[in-house]
Image (cartoon, helix red, strand yellow):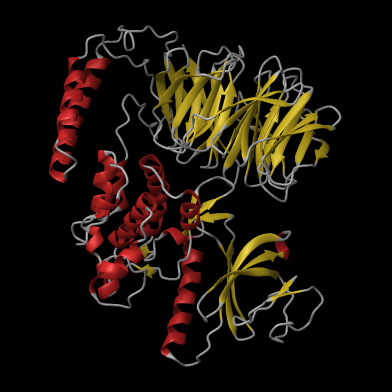
Amino acid sequence: MICCLNPDCPNPLNPNGKKFCQSCSTPLVSLLRNRFRVIRVLSDEGGFGRTYLSEDVDKLNERCVIKQLAPKFQGTWSQKKAMELFAEEAQRLQDLGEHPQIPTLLAYFEQDGCLYLVQQFVNGENLLKELQQRKVYNSREIQSILLDLLPILKFIHDRKIIHRDIKPENIIRNKNDGRLNLIDFGSSKQFTAKVQHKSGTSIGSHGYSPLEQIRDGKAFPASDLFGLGATCFHLLTGNSPFQLWMESGYAWVSNWREYLRSPLNPELDFVIDKLLKKDVHERYQSVDEVLRDLTPKQLLALPPAGKSSGKIPPTKAPYLPKSYPLLKTFILVSAFILLFGFQESWYKHFRRIQTSLVSRLSQHNSSTKDEAFLGQPLNITLGKASLANTLQGHENSVLSVAISPDGKTIASSGDDRKIKLWNLATGSPISSFNTYSQQVNAVVISPDGKTLVTGNDDNTIKIWNLGTGKQIRTLTGHSDSVHALAISADSQTLLSGSDDNTIKIWDLATGEQIRTLVGHTFWVRSVAISPDSVILASGSFDKTIKIWNLTKGYSIRTLEGNSQTVTTVAISPDGKTLASGSRDRTIKLWNLATGKEIRTLVGHVNTVTTLAFSADGKMIASGSRDRTIKLWNPATGAEILTLAGHTNTVTSVTFSPDDKTLISGCEDNTIKIWRLSQ
């Protein structure tokens, strides 16, 4: 099909080969600027143009979005203002597109009397459509949304830019990684003295944009934060701030809690209330202020590595004393405060008491090193952990890491479309494969150390000879990107999980597809095989874990204890325990034989993205979007320590065969090698 570019055309799609639109007789353009093929209309911009889904033929038909400005009233103020905003949006995307959660500008040009802006396509749904599908969000999900969006706002505010139109329609959840993307910078404004102190043009969306912006045309970083608060209110209650504004202006801001279906936790209640202050001076003034109130204190966390040494200082395993009267006092004070509601003055008083008690409790813990953790002895004590090396070579995010069975070689893959092999002992690169048109989502090495397998965004699986680096074959069969791989202990069977909602079982030696497992209703992003190669576990964005009989290909049971997306699964070396990580920030341990939940590990403050058991089964490593790696004792559920050093989402972790080394990959484009000693 070929799409007509007349913004008034009632039926723009035409069969290939036509020279004139069958509906409006406008000459058809097969390729804009001899590069972009327009596929279909995404949205209509109210007579000024349309937004189209397109393909970039110069990039192997990669999807992109084209915004068209086709002014109808030449020489009018409206036409002039529209062109000005359109050019500003292109400039903003040029300035901000380096951020992974903001679309990149691909082109900006004029053709046939129209202006065109071409930007990166974000494959996903906006939060308004997501809300319409699911009806309501809970407190934990809203906190996750805030923690995802606030760093984006900090990024643009640090560059003196204000978005001015924060609302659910302008926030898209990327299908590929679940992260939120901020779009539509057509209303954005440079943060200058003129913007702060002089009246300007009123731009934004009523209900979502604050009073100072709608009434006076003034825009501040705090104005974007109001829009963020209004967006959270909409998602929490299902009530549109625009509809409330139509009925009673900004009166809803003062009594927003009346629309809640259930009370919020005190931290989130306080944060949203301050985001929604009508008076700009009473509102949060910066993203950092919001994060300080929103992010809970992380007890017993390891401090960041020093810039000079690059090493994590030795850390003893955390303990709490058998007798802990301070903890009892803390609980009593918390209950007392809760009885009096969540008013701001009480909340601030509560936080001061809480901080004081936590500080004293932490000091007491550090002086009691030989006591048992909550009355139970730990089975393992980690003496120290240090950052031994940081490997740099990937141009973009590192998405997956694996280690060879002999513990000598690291394999890594990323969205720079490269596979790299590294010498673990020296950190030096061995080789690099750059043969992909799209990103490499997953990499795994066979237990016999002979084969490297990669899962790719082009729907394929590629098999390589690890020793020579030569490609053996390409497996096709999935209809969407492959994000999860696992190989059986005998190196004979390969499993793949895909965004086509299926799991495929392959003969690794021949590449023959054995069977397809169907049952998940959303993307399959993680798979794991039991040591005896009998059981398969799969985690999905449908919030479930499925347990399968691998040899016969049938579903044994479905585990449904997660409140959000299941991002990662791992099976213990003894085959008895299944661990799962989720966007709800928790790690759950399950009895693999019965499917019963053993315990939940809580400590991360953002999505748990990756899990790995140590070779002896005595530790679990977890990576998160909170930029940390945590080590846990699966026998007790105790957190052993936290490794801090990455500056973005930790995407992959794996232990060396001797458990003396932990490898982590991250969206900060690096791989870190951590030395562990007991």
The quadrant of the picture occupied by the N terminus is bottom right
| Side (left or right) of 371 relative to 659 | left
The quarter of the displayed image where residue 61 is located: bottom right
Above or below, comparing residue 181 to residue 677 in the picture? below
Above or below, comparing residue 374 to residue 93 in the picture? above
Identify the residue shown where x is 33% and y is 57%: 230
Identify the residue shown where x is 22% and y is 57%: 277
- The answer to whether residue 358 is seen in the rendering is yes
The one nearer the camera, 552 or 226, is 552
Identify the residue shown where x is 16% and y is 34%: 339
Location of residue 95 in the rendering, given as x and y in whole percent from the top left corner: 47, 63
The one nearer the camera, 145 or 77, is 145
Location of residue 101 in the rendering, given as x and y in whole percent from the top left corner: 50, 53
The one nearer the camera, 676 or 480, is 480
Going by the picture, which residue comes out furthest to the bottom? 75
Location of residue 489 in the rendering, given as x and y in whole percent from the top left corner: 72, 18
Above or below, comparing residue 199 to residue 539 in the picture? below
The quarter of the displayed image where residue 510 is located: top right
- The answer to whether residue 665 is seen in the rendering is no
Above or below, comparing residue 293 to residue 511 in the picture? below
Q: How many marks?
A: 0
Identify the residue shown where x is 40% and y is 9%: 378
Location of residue 217 in the rendering, given as x and y in whole percent from the top left corner: 29, 74
The quarter of the displayed image where residue 59 is located: bottom right
